[in-house]
Every structure is written in structure tokens, then in C-alpha cells.
Image (cartoon, grey):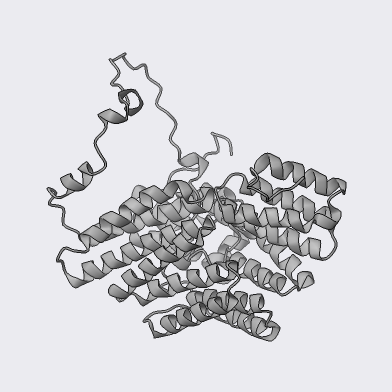
Amino acid sequence: MTEQARPQELPAGLLTDPEMIEACRVRDFARVFRMVKIRAGVYPSMIARQCELTPSRVGEVIAGRRQLLHMDVVERIADGLRIPGHMLGLARRPWETPRPLEFSQPEVPQEPGPEALGASMLPGADVDSILALTTKTRLNAATLGAFQTSIEGYWRQDDQHGGEALRPAIVGQLRYVVGRLKENRPADIQNGLYGVAAELARMVGWIYFDARQYHQATAYFTQALQLAREGDDRQAMTNVLGCLSLQATYEDKPADSLAYVTAAQDQARSALGTTPRVLSMLAMREAFAHATLGNRDSTHRALGEAHRQFEQIQAADPDPSWVSYFDEPKLIVDTGIAHGRLGEAVIAEPLIADALRRENHANQRGRAFHSFWLARTQLDQGKLDQACHTATQALESASTVASERVAGHLREFYDQLAPHRNEPVALAFEARLRALLPPVSGSIRP
């Protein structure tokens, strides 16, 4: 889009209106378009032009006869209407970065930065904790909201870059929050603080899981479960148990995986306000466990339940924010992976390929992981050239994110190429693998 054609900014009052924020969060574009028309004077024909949609399509959306689900369409709406990416669950849009101001700045003496000062000039690690004892800040609903905003930022960064670099910050925040739990405050704020602590502990567990450090992951998942129980947060307990179930499939403990997901489903059913999206996600985790056990009929039954629950989702459902990732492309790709785990590669391949075309391109780890599964199903069908091409695409995504889990999958794919090791496409993949992912001891042999 040229500078001359740049769309006008929406009024700040509209972008901060709670109704607009909620409509964007659930991607209710019928409401979004109506509010843009009424509050900003951007009529349907202008919406269509700015978002590269047809006027009839915009009209159908406003009338409630059509939903807009494809990620590329959501991105065009964000860019065309100048809706900040985070409001629609997207990465920061290129146009959100303000153009630097151009003016001559007088020269002033520069203060030496931390690098120049050296570590000996910085405060010791305990100083911040000691000084925190002198603060009079009272925790309230706004504070909890700030914690949740930072957590959602961690989620996005983890998807895009991996969590290893985030771990020290999250652990530090977890320790701070756990320390504040010892203070007396109203029950609703205290329970909310337990929920924040539980999610921070779960995130640290997830980061260790993604690094394939399962013992540490289990320790933090267990802490998260205890914190959620103290806060009587059954939704959080459901999420943690779901993570433990997924980890158990990686540890080749499918019976444990099934036990964890069954417990998660029990918690979900006993919690008030559990939504179909949560139940659909848990049914998919159950399908993974059955598929790892080789239970074909049980896997298919769990997949059917996942799709049945997903069809019950309503835009107004009060989904917990941690399950928002489980959208239609994720449902489809996980269905394909479950079939792939069963050895049903012919069914799995088109499902995974379709989901890859539609999922969020900002989630580099997810794209690498799903591309690996697509390559594996192609290899299972004897499509060597396609499989190596797809695996090379997975490598490109994996090289931008710190995830030993994904890197390990791609090394496993290399091992699966053993019967074809001397084929040109396999040799090309090996060269790319060595260039982009540093080998671990014994993982890539000449």
C-alpha cells in the first residue's frame, strides 16, 4: 500500500472502547464493521476497498451470514482499518512502528551505560527484593490486569522466538508474585494472584518442556497445579493437566498421558463456565494419548468429540485466554497429527497441508512443528522429494526459534531418511540441517 493510499487512523476512543476491544478479541467482524461505520464513518464500500474484500462479502459479514476466519483476511482487515495487531491476536503490524522524528539533537555528555560501568557497579541481586519491602503498592484488579497483559506478551514471544530467553524474566516474576501471596488481602484479589502465579509457573514448565528438560518441566507444572488448587482455579488446573498429558506423550508414557487428560476433563466438567473450545482441545489431547497407545477406535472417537465440541463454539463464549490458540487451523492440523500417529498418512497429509496454509505465520515454532509432521506423512507414503522439500521448509522456520523440541523432531526426520541417505534430496536436506541447526552429540552422523 503506497503512502498516498494509506488509510486513516481510527479514532482513539473507538480503539479503546471495551466493546470494540472485545469484538476484536473474539474476531466478531460483524460488530467491528458496524462500530467502524458508526463511530469512524468508514462505510462498507470503504471497508471493502481498504481491506481488499468484495462489498457483497462485507455485507454478508455485517448481516451475520458469513464469518471471516482465514488469517490472511484477518491481517488485511488489521492493515486496512489500522487496527493494532495485538487487538486481533496478531503480531505487531509493520505500520505500528512510528516513523522516527527527524531533528538535530544537540550534543550532550553521554552517561556511561551498564556495559561501560561493569558488573561491579550494578546493584547486587538481592537489592531489589530488599527495596521492595519499602513499597506501599497495593494489589488490586488493575494490578492483576497488568500481570495478565505481561503473560499474554510472554505467550506471543514464546510462539515467535521460543521461551529460553524469557525464562529468567518469568521465573523472576513468579518469585515476586509468590512472595506477595504471603500478604493479607481480599479473597478475590488473592485468588486472582494465585491464578497469575499458577500461569507463570505453568509457562516456566512449558519452556522446560519445549527444551526437552522434562524433569524440570514436571517440577514447575506440579507447582502450577498446587498454586491453581490454592486459588480454587479449576480452569487453570485443567490447563496444567493438559500440558502434563502432552508432555507424557513425548516421554513415551501414553498411559500417563491418558490419565492426565482424563483428570483434566474431570476438572473442566466440574468448573463453572467451561467452554466448548476447552472441551474440544482436551478431546484432542485424549486423541493423542489413544493414538500413541495405538487405539484406533478410541482415537477416532476422541477426534469426533473434538470436532463436535468445536462446532458448538459461539463468538460470545467466555473462553479463558490460554485456549485462544486452539482455532480452526489448529483443530485441523492436530486432527492430521493424530491420524499420522496412527500411521494413517493418507488421511493426515491433506489435513496438515490445509492447516499450514491457513495458520498464523507469526507462530514460527508451530509452523516448523506442523511442517515436520507433514514431511513425515509424505515420507510414510514414499514421497521422498516432497518430504525433503517440506522438511527443509520446517528447518527455515525452526532456525528462527529456540526450541529443542522442534529441532529434535527434525533430527528424527533425518534418522528416518536412513534408507535414502545417498539420494540427492536427502543429501541436500542433511546439508541444510547441518547449516541451520547445530548438531547435538550423536544426533547427526556422517
Residue 42: x and y in percent read 47, 52
The one of 187 and 243 positioned closer to us in this rendering:
243
Residue 424: x and y in percent read 86, 45
Q: Quadrant of the N terminus?
A: top right
Question: Left or right: where does residue 364 sit relative to residue 156?
Answer: right
Count every numbered label the image shows and give the total.
Answer: 0
User: Hey, which quadrant is residue 360 in on the image?
Assistant: bottom right
Residue 324: x and y in percent read 48, 65
Task: Give the answer, above or below, for where 309 lies relative to 417.
Answer: below
Task: Give the answer, above or below, for where 171 lies relative to 28.
Answer: above
Tell me which residue sits at (41%, 69%) in the image.
Answer: 320
Tell me which residue sits at (61%, 70%) in the image.
Answer: 252
User: Hey, which quadrant is residue 356 in on the image?
Assistant: bottom right
> Furthest residue to the right?
423
Question: Left or right: where does residue 58 sit relative to residue 346?
Answer: left
User: Hey, which quadrant is residue 31 in on the image?
Assistant: bottom left
Residue 146 seen in this snapshot: no
Residue 60: x and y in percent read 58, 67
Question: Left or right: where does residue 281 sit relative to residue 294?
Answer: left
The one of 357 and 226 positioned closer to us in this rendering:
226
Question: Left or right: where does residue 121 sit relative to residue 425?
Answer: left
> Furthest residue to the front?
442
Tell me which residue sits at (64%, 85%) in the image.
Answer: 298
Q: Quadrant of the C terminus?
A: top right
Residue 111 seen in this snapshot: yes
Tell me which residue sits at (21%, 59%) in the image.
Answer: 180
